[in-house]
Image: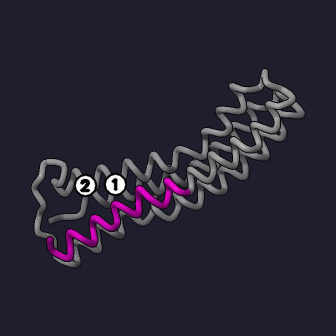
Amino acid sequence: MNDGLLIAIIGAALAAILPGIGSAIGVQMGGRAASGVMSEKPELFVRLLILQALPGTQGIYGFLTAVILINRLGLLGGSAPALTTGQGWLFFGACMPITIVGLLSALYQARTAVSAIHMTAKQPKASTSGMIMTAVVETYAILALLAGLLLIWNIPF
């Protein structure tokens, strides 16, 4: 395996790993808060489940980025291209927007989701507002995903 390909694969791996870790922590934070609320108000399950799940999307975006890069490199078909070290770094860099923003936005979205869960416990009809506030944080993960994909699709080799 050449160095360029190895660097690109490390970028793809980080894109899957770090947002996945952020999402796992975020979903756990939401689940812990929701469990406390459900012990007293089990009828709020569906509303709380949605709020708990929202921080999980960044992990999906990171995984999607990794799969698209692996596919772009032809690795799903079993053929590994020869990449220069410079090309490897370009692909690595293309993975960094979702790697970094995905990790951090999952954690910050989880904090917002926990607040929305607490709000829903006190005012169940406000859960939609809490979902909207939680989803706004995700905007930045979506922008990072798009930036990374545009870079991946446009790096020549």
Relative to 62, is 55 on the left or the right? right
Q: Residue at x 72, y 52 (%)?
A: 111
**Label 2 element class:** helix
Q: Is residue 92 above or below residue 61?
A: below
In percent of width and height, residue 44 lies at 77, 25
Q: Quadrant of the C terminus?
A: bottom left
The quarter of the displayed image where residue 39 is located: top right
Q: Quadrant of the N terminus?
A: bottom left
Q: Mark 2 touching mark 1, by CB under 8 A?
A: yes
Q: Residue furthest top?
A: 43
Relative to 117, is 149 on the left or the right? left
Q: Residue at x 69, y 37 (%)?
A: 131
Majority secondary structure of the magenta segment? helix
In percent of width and height, residue 132 lies at 68, 38
Q: Name the residue nearer the viewer: 67 or 17.
A: 17
Residue on which the image places disc 2: 70
Q: Residue at x 52, y 53 (%)?
A: 141
Q: Is residue 114 above or below residue 126?
A: below
Magenta segment: 1-21
